[in-house]
Image (cartoon, rainbow, N blue to C red):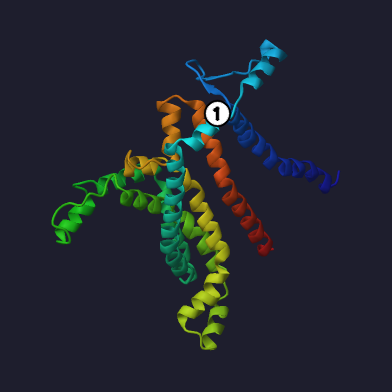
Amino acid sequence: MSGRRIFARPARFAAIAPYVWMVLLFLVPFAFVLKISLSQTAIAQPPYEPVFDLAAGWESLKAAFAALSLDNFRLLGSDDIYVYAYVRSLTVAVTATALLLLIGYPIAYGMARLPKRWQAVAMVLVIVPFWTSFLIRIYAWINILQHDGLLNQILLALHLVSQPVVWLSTDTAMYIGIVYSYLPFMILPLYATLAKMEPALEEAASDLGAPPWQVFWLVTFPLSLPGVGAGVLLCFIPIVGEFVIPDLLAGSNSLMIGQTLWLEFFTNKDWPVASAAAIVLLVVLLVPLLLYERLQKRQLEQGR
């Protein structure tokens, strides 16, 4: 038997695997959530109706399908609480992503310009926070930002403030936590793009008389746009649905869609409304997800 035949079947399974993964881990759960979003809340277990009972026969299934409705989606559009949660989530995501880009780009640029032996060290320093639990890092920021925390102690010791500043349970604390947590996701794709850039292009622009700022805007930044796009989408998409950081650092007054989903699912036990909110969130994020997928495909084609 030839080597080509031996490896033909595993190659086919490898090609099918992503589609199997998508069906089992995305489409099937999505179908369940979509069905629940079209149901009505009920004091039962599970807390919604109708419930599809295959053993009850075809007529029962027809009646269950007929009972499905779009009432929960109409509620989301008519209730200001949900509209506010979506708008605030998008606003926070855009603002935090802009801050991440402003902070992450200089760091990635500096890493790409380091000598080769130091670039690996810088990469490790960026990844090191992932070695500890996400929750532990957020609770550490709670201790730093609280009334008698480390930050206020330093500011008081340096006589920069006359009394402790209120950091915790504010939008400032939330943005600090988001930027800290998602900064590696911005730096890594930027660094990967900047490290592959030919220094000769910048040198040629300088030799032609372009000042450093013009070299950056006309040569460096345009060539790094694939990394910028990947970093922006990689941060923006999960920040929109972020729950832990706003809940722990911004408090209950900062209502984002992730907190709204939590409240509806676990406090109000309103699974249909929560499922409808999750479906709408997925639709909202579908555009950046498709943009990210296209960007990844373009980068792979350029890499060839």
Identify the residue at horizontal 67%, vertical 13% (top origin).
60
In the displayed structure image, the side of residue 253 where residue 269 appears, left or right? right
How many numbered marks are there? 1
Estimate the x, y position of residue 105 in percent, counting from the top left: 45, 65
Q: Nearer the viewer, residue 294 or 60?
A: 60
Q: Is residue 133 visible?
A: no
Residue drawn at 46 percent across, 41 percent down? 83
Left or right, 290 with respect to 179, comes to right
Find disc 1 in the rendering and name its residue. 71
User: What kind of residue is marked 1?
Assistant: Asp
Question: 194 above or below 205?
Answer: above
Q: Residue at x 53, y 59 (%)?
A: 189
| Name of the residue lying farthest toward the front | 78
Give the class, few, some or many, for how many residues have Cα within 10 Å of label 1's Cα (few <14, many ≥20): some
Compare residues 281 and 116 and report the one nearer the observer: 281
Residue 199 percent across, percent down from the top left: 54, 77
> Where is residue 223 drawn, in percent x and y?
57, 70
Can the viewer see residue 225? yes
Q: Nearer the viewer, residue 197 or 142?
A: 142
Q: Quadrant of residue 73?
A: top right
Q: x and y percent of residue 264 in the render?
A: 44, 30
User: Which quarter of the rendered picture does the C terminus lie within?
Assistant: bottom right
Query: Furthest residue to the right?
Result: 1
Q: Secondary structure at mark 1?
A: helix
Q: Is residue 129 above or below residue 207?
A: above
Q: Is residue 125 above or below residue 27?
A: below
On the picture, is 279 further left or further right than 129? right
Q: Quadrant where the N terminus lies?
A: top right
